[in-house]
Image (cartoon, rainbow, N blue to C red):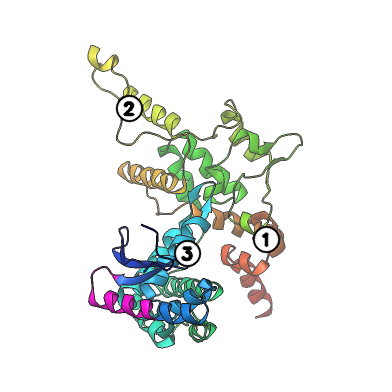
Amino acid sequence: MPRRSNPVPSYRLHKSSGQARVLIGGQHIYLGVYGSEVSRQRYARLLAKQTATSNSSPSSPQSVVATLDRELTVAALVLRYWEFAETYYVKDGQPTKELVSMREALRPVRRLFGDTEAEQFGPKSLKLVREHMIDQGLSRKVINQRVNRIKRAFKWAVAEELVCPAVLHGLQAVTGLRFGRTAARETEPIRPAPDASVEAVLAFVAPQVAAMIQLQRCTGMRPNEVVAMRPCDIDRSDDVWNYEPASHKNQWRGHVRQIPLGPRAQAIVAPFLDRPQQAYLFSPTEAEAFRNERRRQARRSPMTPSQSTRGPRANPKRAKRAGYDVDSYRRAITYGLARAKRAGVVVEPWHPLQLRHLHATRVRQQFGLEGAQVALGHARADVTQVYAERNFELARKIACQLG
């Protein structure tokens, strides 16, 4: 039997989202929850519009899709944007944390306004989503970041001609929450790590973690930069070595990140250079071997024959990876702080990013704001202000003499 020249598009299920969809003009249009009355009615309207548009301009399927997308729901828009985001927010073949942040930002939009037509999602709708975030207890800065991500998704939809530009123009009129003028929770600014606590924890962590802590303290590099160090990334042809991370925060902007390693940093790195060029300097496997040896030496009873011949598990639940990531590095520091407290050492809690703030503050005190800017690799000095604490000791001296 010959095929019909203009077959009727089928009402289908999109399994991963649970939505109904229809294929028109080579593009998928999502209708809402599969089997719902709303999706059935929308499907009927789309068929009617397709027939009318095909009769007027049968050779332009793109115009059909453009006409149909005027009834695109917010849930369908989010789904289509997510298909784009999964391919865009990728680095070195892996999804970035921005993809996770985007999911968290779009989740309340889909839950509160999923069945609303995207053209009807305006400033008041965005403000309701923002109020929902406030009720959840999110901080003001996090809420502003998530609102900006929502705007970014609608900006993409405008660029794809899924919604009219007036929708984005209306959303851009919603300004960010201001300090002291909102019920949203405020957070404390990140302070430099307490140097005494940093020094105290070194004795309670593995040598690999201690080396990363000391490197951050004397170079100010980011946590993700110190965990990714490899011999091949370090140029040792000069008196001052140059570490150029293979991947860094502003790589997508075309920036080059270079971290000079002076004598102190070189002495910290040197013991870990005896490995393949592509291998990470700081290995969780080596740290685990160090901890096992330390436990073995601390035993009060001799090992049994079965214990001495016991090898590692063939399929461990959490096998050690080739290198640390930011989360495992932070957990190792937290573990060291807990061990220090159990040993009776007074320490204050801190995390790896505070080491960068500590280095920035020291550099600013000795070399000024410009010195801190180049040491941290910032393009603008106003960004450095966030990291480098002001030298209040100098202000006290000025007050003593002139105030």
Dots 2 and 1: beta carbons under 8 Å? no
Q: Residues within 10 Å of mark 2 (few under 14, many from 20)?
A: few
Quadrant in the picture for the C terminus: bottom right
Q: Earlier in the sequence, mark 3 or mark 1?
A: 3
- Of residue 264 and residue 143, the one placed in the foreground of this image is 143
Q: In this view, does 76 lie above or below 45?
A: above
Q: What residue type is labelled 2?
A: Arg
Residue at 37%, 27% (x, y): give it.
294
Residue drawn at x 36%, y 72% as measured from the top left: 75
Is residue 176 among the parts visible in the rendering?
no
Q: What is the three-letter code of the residue carrying label 1?
A: Gln
Q: What stretch is highlighted in magenta?
A: 33-48
Q: Would you place residue 185 above or below residue 264 in this image?
A: below
Total label count?
3
* 166 in relation to 345, above or below: below
Q: Can residue 82 be seen in this view?
A: yes
Nearer to me, 377 or 58 = 58
First along the sequence among labels 2 and 3: 3
Q: Where is residue 69 in the image (x, y as percent from the top left)?
A: 44, 76
* Of residues 86 and 274, the one drawn nearer to the viewer in this rendering: 86
Report the side of 305 relative to 14 (left or right): left
Q: On the image, which quarter does residue 392 sit in?
A: bottom right
- Residue that carries the numbered disc 2 in the rendered image: 295
The span from disc 2 to disc 1 (Cα, nearest Å) is 43 Å
- For mark 1, what is the residue? 373
Judged by depth in the image, the label closer to the viewer, 2 or 1, is: 1
Say what amino acid the circle numbered 3 marks: Gly
Residue at position x 53%, y 48% from top? Answer: 224
- Closest to the observer, 1 or 338: 1
